[in-house]
Image (cartoon, rainbow, N blue to C red):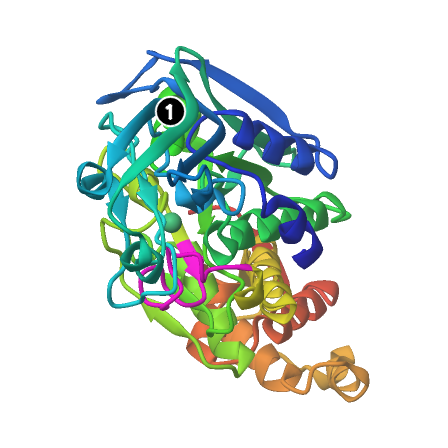
Amino acid sequence: MHAFIERLYPICRSITGDGVRRTLSAISERLPLDVVEVPTGTPAFDWEVPREWNIRDAWIADDTGRRVVDFRQSNLHVVGYSVPVNRKMSLEELRPHLHTLPDRPDVTPFRTSYFHEGWGFCLPDRRLRELPDGEYQVVIDSSLTNGHLTYGEVVLEGESEEEFLVSTHVCHPSLGNDNLSGIAVATWLAGAISQLPRRRFTYRFLFVPGLIGPIVWLSRNEERVGRIRHGLVLACIGDAGHPTYKRTRRANADIDRAFEHVLRDSGQEYRITDFTPFGYDERQFNSPGFDLPVGLLMRSPHGEYPEYHTSADDLSIVRPESLADSLAKVLSVVDVLEHDRRYVNLSPKGEPQLGRRGLYRTIGGGGFRDLEPALLWVLNLSDGTSSLLDVAERSGLPFGAVREAALALSDVGLLVETTDR
Ligand code: ZN
């Protein structure tokens, strides 16, 4: 995953344009990705698809022709969606178009101007302070024209039409944790799920530009969203911080409960936060007109790590072990939701004799230390209303032990699955 991030890092992505297409093309080498092109001007609820932005080069040169700010050194130097410019200006005229972080003088900030026509450059404050007064040649060789918004979609069919949605944004230029970590983990997650021997749910992966991307997708798929049973947005999941899960608007959706269970059971540090109407693409999926059960997995929350939205969010803060851990956590959640079922105890009057049915032997030889209490918990709570995740929550036992117990009890005829509500 880290090598994939390294490869995608130099590409200048934005909410539209060839950077997104190149990124999707790299993902499509690994996954059966449908690339969808939506024309400029297409309405999407209260929005419309903007003009397409592409950039070839940009610089500020001093009177000797030397580039003092150069897009070729870092695509963060140009404000995303800058309109074309080619003129000579004094430093004073140029200054309103220059963005720096005075309190962090060595890093370049990441700025965009998607929905307000303008242009600008971003640079380290220290470099700005070194620029002498004088005339500068300012060039932004970009285009903002009628074109398309591009997104990618992967569907992995399951036994059921009910869907598990995973979404990640693909619109940031050379930034590592936000958002290449999400792109890499989503790509590997889809790869792992495509290899599962059985899938209960149909999995839908979206690789979309932030904000406008999910709005456009929702506007084109309104009749389909009722099938979404579980959903997850992945963002900022490669840094050294511990996992942070942000709940859905509903706050007690199965995805919320599955994450709480997996994180609690991991024995590692983690954080769970309540839903807020800001953040990433979960905002759109959780808007009141949809209210979909879509949570957000991060490590250090956006805006809370010092490198966020600056040139310091580079390849060095993305750690292979954090990427691997984030992937493993999501796969554990997938495993819980794939196997969560409700059962009915067929011998509910008094405890059934487990020894007579060989179940205590299973305990001796089984992999789960927690199997014996799990058998009793599953028998007790399986009245058709509690699911295995409910049993795991209430008992404090790992989901795997509860599931193992349910399978063992079903094998000897003490338990039967129910789908009645
Ligand atoms: Zn961001």
Q: Amino acid at mark 1?
A: Val
Q: Quadrant of residue 251?
A: bottom left
> What percent of the width, then of the height, locates residue 416?
61, 57
**Is 339 above or below relative to 170?**
below
Which residue is located at x 52 percent, y 70 percent?
Answer: 262
Q: Nearer the viewer, residue 413 or 338?
A: 338
Check disc 1: other Cα within 10 Å, few if <14, some if 14-19, many if 20+: many
Magenta region: which residues? 296-314
> What percent of the width, then of the height, locates residue 141?
44, 24
Q: Nearer the viewer, residue 3 or 86?
A: 86
Which residue is located at x 41 percent, y 63 percent?
Answer: 257
- Is residue 412 covered in magenta? no
Which residue is located at x 58 percent, y 79 percent?
Answer: 374
Which residue is located at x 22 percent, y 38 percent?
Answer: 288
Judged from the image, the secondary structure of the residue bearing numbered disc 1 is helix
Q: Nearer the viewer, residue 121 or 311?
A: 121
- Is residue 304 covered in magenta? yes
Residue bearing mark 1: 216
Determine whether the beta carbon of the residue marked 1 sits less than 8 angstroms from the nearest atom of ligand 1: no
> What percent of the width, then of the height, locates residue 89?
25, 32
Q: Quadrant of residue 86?
A: top left
Q: Tell me the chief SS of the magenta region.
A: loop
Residue 400 in sight in this render: yes
**Is 4 above or below relative to 307?**
above
Relative side of 411 to 200, left or right: right
Residue 386 in sight in this render: no
Q: Give the quadrant of the N terminus.
A: bottom right
> What percent of the width, then of the height, locates residue 80?
37, 36
Name of the residue lying farthest toward the front = 64
Q: Nearer the viewer, residue 403 or 181?
A: 181
